[in-house]
Image: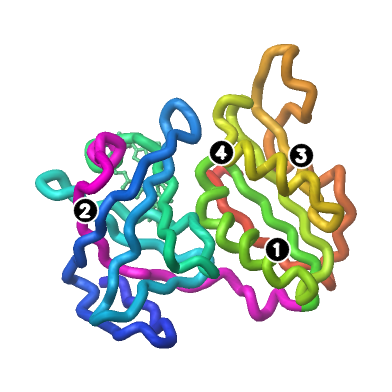
Amino acid sequence: MMEPAIIPNQPNLDPMIPVPAIVRRIVWETDDTFTLFLEPPLFDGMPFSFEPGQFNMLYAFGTGEAAISISSDPGKPGSLAHTIHRVGTVTSSFSKLKRGEMIGLRGPFGRSWPMKQAEGMDVCIVAGGIGLAPLRPVIYSILKHRKKFARLTLLYGARTPLDLLYRVELEQWNKHDDFEVLITVDRSDSSWKGHIGVVTNLLSYIKLDARSTIAMVCGPEIM
Ligand SMILES: Cc1cc2nc3c(=O)[nH]c(=O)nc-3n(C[C@H](O)[C@H](O)[C@H](O)COP(=O)(O)OP(=O)(O)OC[C@H]3O[C@@H](n4cnc5c(N)ncnc54)[C@H](O)[C@@H]3O)c2cc1C
């Protein structure tokens, strides 16, 4: 059984019992991936809180349950988002949810990315595909406390330009002077002017000092 993480100020309720969570909206990021925004549930009257990298078990009534990382900003507990790749029964069921409908939620589970250890260091985030979802809370947290961290780099790869998640935010992040964002796609037509190739190829475009850099990496196994 997965152990629930101990979150300060959050009562450690029975991790086997889902709490109701109301759907606020669904935003499609790509043809097969969407972000599900939920009304953050209360636990004994306490607001839901989580750390970057944690996940919830989301339960579609009558269908089943899936582990889904939290992709929203931990500093904004009023909004709880999960970015979901529609691959099978449960994730398809989530994709059909409408505003006001209810799902079950257990969590948060899992350990945080090493945010404390990263303070004072260069941070290199490497994400492949849906792997950007559990890393987005890290980006929000670092941008909020930018002075606590040294260089910040994001290397992000998707199959095609149409598979890139969070396109508006990627553009915004790219405008930050102190945030280096490099994006690549596996394949594209000539309309794509950026990098082509797997995400790890991007490592050759940046300078890393292994002694002062912490890497946070999430993507498919082959990555
Ligand atoms: C800790 C953790 C965090 C996760 N976070 C996320 C997240 O943030 N977003 C997210 O979308 N998923 C995430 N996943 C994966 C997610 O839990 C599964 O994709 C989900 O359980 C699939 O359920 P399903 O019923 O829709 O698919 P199933 O009906 O179980 O699978 C149907 C078919 O899809 C295939 N399949 C299953 N998963 C995948 C996949 N990921 N890619 C390609 N084919 C697949 C299976 O091989 C099967 O053929 C996470 C998993 C873990 C363990």
Which circle's residue, 3 or 1, is located before the other in the chain? Answer: 1
The residue indicated by pointer 4 is 165
Q: Is residue 101 left or right of residue 187?
A: left
Q: Quadrant of residue 95?
A: top left
- Separation of disc 3 and disc 1 at Cα? 25 Å
User: Ligand 1 near label 3 (Cβ, under 8 Å)?
Assistant: no
The answer to whether the residue labelled 3 contacts the one labelled 1, judged by CB atoms less than 8 Å apart, is no
- Separation of disc 2 and disc 3 at Cα? 40 Å
Q: Amino acid at mark 1?
A: Leu
The answer to whether the residue labelled 3 contacts the one labelled 4, judged by CB atoms less than 8 Å apart, is no
Q: Which residues are magenta?
A: 92-119
The answer to whether the residue labelled 1 contacts the one labelled 2, judged by CB atoms less than 8 Å apart, is no
Q: Amino acid at mark 2?
A: Ile
Q: Amino acid at mark 4?
A: Leu
Residue occupying image coordinates x 63% and y 26%: 161
Answer yes or no: is residue 172 visible: yes
Q: Quadrant of residue 212?
A: bottom right
Q: Quadrant of residue 38?
A: bottom left
The nearer-to-camera label among 3 and 4 is 4
Eyeballing the image, is 86 above or below 117? above
The image position of residue 113, as x and y in percent, is 57, 69
The nearer-to-camera label among 4 and 1 is 1
The image position of residue 80, as x and y in percent, is 41, 59
The residue indicated by pointer 3 is 201
